[in-house]
Every structure is written in C-alpha cells, then in structure tokens.
Amino acid sequence: MEDESCYSSVIFKPFDKEKSKVRQSDEFVLYGEVKRKQSSEETSHTEITDYIHVSKHNNILAQYTKERAANLQLLADKEVLEQETARLATQGQQMNSTLDFIIHKISFSGDKYCQFTGNGARCTSCPQNWIQNGSSCYYFHKGNTWNTWTESQKYCEKYEAQLAIIDSVGEQEFINQHTEFYYDAYHGYWIGLYKKMGLTWVWTNDAQLERGFWSDRPDERYSYCVLSMPSKNLVRSWRSASCSMKNRWICEMDVLTWPTFLQAQQNHSDPST
C-alpha cells in the first residue's frame, strides 16, 4: 500500500518595523506535504482482505468448472437417450411391418425364413432357396420337373408369390444372369407376362406391358405366354411360346423386413429344389 499523505496550512508573516501596517490580505500561504506510513495492523488487515477476495474468486471458478462439466455430461446423456429412442422407434416400426406381413401371409412358415439356435433366431428377408434383389425375392426353378405356364403360376401362389414381373432394365439383367441353358434352345423360364384374351400383353398383376426385352418378334398366333431365355444379350431374351409347353419358371415376391436384432446375412446362393 502507498503511504498516506496529509496536508496542513502554515502562514508566515513578514517581519517589519511597521508591522502594524501589514494588511491581512498580504499574508503568504504555503502548503507542505506530510506522509505517514501504514501501521503493521493496517497492512495485515489489507492482506487478509485481499486473501478473502482471491479465495472467493477461486471458489466461484471451481464451482463454475464443476457445473460446466456436469452440464456437458447431461448433454452427452441426452444425445445417447435420443439415439436410443430413435433406435427403439425404428425397431417398433419394423416389428409392426413384420407382424402385418405375417398376418396377411396365409401360408407363412417361420422356418422358411428363420434359423433357430441356442443363441436365438436369425432371419433372412427371403425364404430359403430364394434370392433377394432390391425389394423383391426370386425363386429360379432349376429342377427336372417342369410345368406349364398356369402350373408355374399356381406353384408361385403357394408362396403367395407370382411369376416374375420385369419392369426395369436392372431387373431384366438380374434375371438373365441367374438363368442357365438346359435341354435345348426352345426351353426357358416362364415369367408373368401373357396375352390376355389373345389381345393385349399384360402381367399377372394386370399391368399392361410398357417395355419388352424380346429376342425376336413375338408370335401373334397361339404363343400367348412368355419365356425368359438364357442369352448373352442381357436385354434381349424374351420369347413367346405356347402356354401349355413345359418349362422351368421364376417366382417373385416382396421381401420381408425383420427387426434389426433378428436379421441375418442374406444367402445369395442360387436356389435349388
């Protein structure tokens, strides 16, 4: 602390014989500065006061740091809870979708989709021996028992599926890649396209044909059903044939989305009978 300063006034009058003639207004005023040191008690008191202020400041800073850390932890916990809530909501939607699928699937059989072990069930989006592509599952019949177009459609219906409906280049290429040559050049795989009433090419869902992938011009006489033939040209493989001809076939159905904790890796191997 700096020394304190005190001020006092000292008046000096001039010494003169005619002392009585000096007016009061002629007085000279001088100022002097007198400094006084602080006592040891005052110094000690000041130091104590400073220590108290510093201590309060440190306490406030420590409390702020503690509360800030607690707040950051709460924010982190909140984010974790929000993520868990979103996960549970998604899982709930998946379970509702799966339940709806099962309820409306008259012939649904869990063992066609799931494998049960001591660790629980692991389920695929498609039945065993079916192949997933996008949102659909496909069954490529590769056995030696062949069917007419109508018999093939009835086989698919047992799985609540239908003969394959091809409505994009990508789907056409996928199907062509999974067909193989068998018997002779006239045999292929029935798909869900036929000539309704002998007039219009339609799919099994009654949608009219918008784009075809014909290998040659379709026969307009009695060939009212369509085969997908194994072909090196992926987008030119369809051939019209008599619906009573015996061939292999391709079924298609929607995938089944299981809750995440039940999902297993889809088996992409070719189906077999």
Image (cartoon, rainbow, N blue to C red):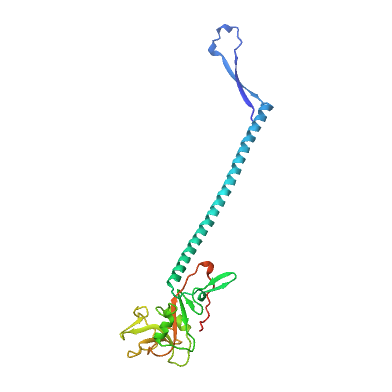
> Looking at the image, is 218 positioned above or below residue 89?
below
Image x and y of residue 15, in percent: 61, 10
* Observer able to see residue 132: yes
Snapshot quadrant of residue 243: bottom left
- The count of marks equals 0
Image x and y of residue 166, in percent: 40, 80
Point out the image quarter for the N terminus: top right
Snapshot quadrant of residue 190: bottom left
Tell which residue pokes out farthest to the right in this image: 40
Tell me what residue is drawn at x 55 percent, y 54 percent. 77
Image x and y of residue 13, in percent: 59, 12
Tell me what residue is drawn at x 48 percent, y 61 percent. 89
Snapshot quadrant of residue 97: bottom left
Tell which residue pokes out farthest to the front in this image: 106
Tell me what residue is drawn at x 43 percent, y 81 percent. 156
Tell me what residue is drawn at x 69 percent, y 27 percent. 40
> Looking at the image, is 53 positioned above or below residue 264?
above
Please name whichever residue, 113 or 137, is drawn nearer the observer in this view of the structure: 113
* Observer able to see residue 172: no
Image x and y of residue 257, in percent: 48, 70
Please name whichever residue, 3 or 73, is drawn nearer the observer in this view of the structure: 73
Please name whichever residue, 140 or 37, is drawn nearer the observer in this view of the structure: 140
